[in-house]
Amino acid sequence: MAETFRADPTALARLAAATLAASTGLSDAWDSHRPELAVPAAAFGNTPASPASARSHAAATDAGELAIDRVTGVCDGDVDRLYRAAFAYEQADRAAAAAAAAARRPGGGRVIAQ
């Protein structure tokens, strides 16, 4: 006998909303703090290592931006999939309820030829 899998559409929709909120929060936090990471090259001093330090800082900032973009992109895709799954389970629940109601009617939901 095959096992059945059951998911609560409401819980899936709540998870999608929470995932979207987390993704938006992460993106907003990065955007609001990004200007603070824009350090002028002169701030790294005038030693022989200063230019390399400035380049490393810029590269790390760029890598952080890429990471945030990738994480929020994955989250946004997950949100879409969670909402689609919630909708599919809701539709399946409605179809099962309609089939159960039809089976309880006289004649088991079948049309009886007269």
Image (cartoon, helix red, strand yellow):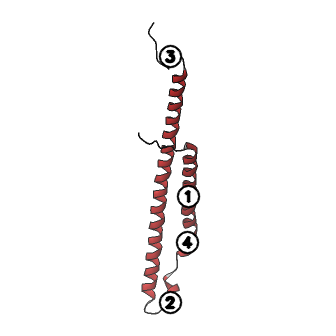
Whole-percent x, y for residue 78 in the image = 47, 53
Q: Classify mark 3: helix, strand or loop.
A: loop
Q: Residues within 10 Å of mark 3 (few under 14, many from 20)?
A: few
Circles 1 and 4: CB distance less than 8 Å?
A: no
Q: Amino acid at mark 3?
A: Gly
Residue that carries the numbered disc 1 in the rendered image: 24
Whole-percent x, y for residue 99 in the image = 50, 27
Q: Residues within 10 Å of mark 1 (few under 14, many from 20)?
A: some
Q: Residue at x 54, y 22 (%)?
A: 104
Q: Quadrant of the C terminus?
A: top left
Alpha carbon separation for disc pair 1 and 4: 18 Å
Alpha carbon separation for disc pair 3 and 4: 71 Å
Sequence-wise first label, 3 or 2: 2
Residue that carries the numbered disc 4 in the rendered image: 35
Q: Classify mark 4: helix, strand or loop.
A: helix
Q: Quadrant of the N terminus?
A: top left
Q: Nearer the viewer, mark 1 or mark 2?
A: 1
Residue that carries the numbered disc 2 in the rendered image: 45
Alpha carbon separation for disc pair 3 and 2: 88 Å
Whole-percent x, y for residue 26 in the image = 55, 63
Give the vertical position of 80 relative to 27 (above or below). above
Toward the bottom, the furthest residue is 47
Q: Residue at x 47, y 48 (%)?
A: 81
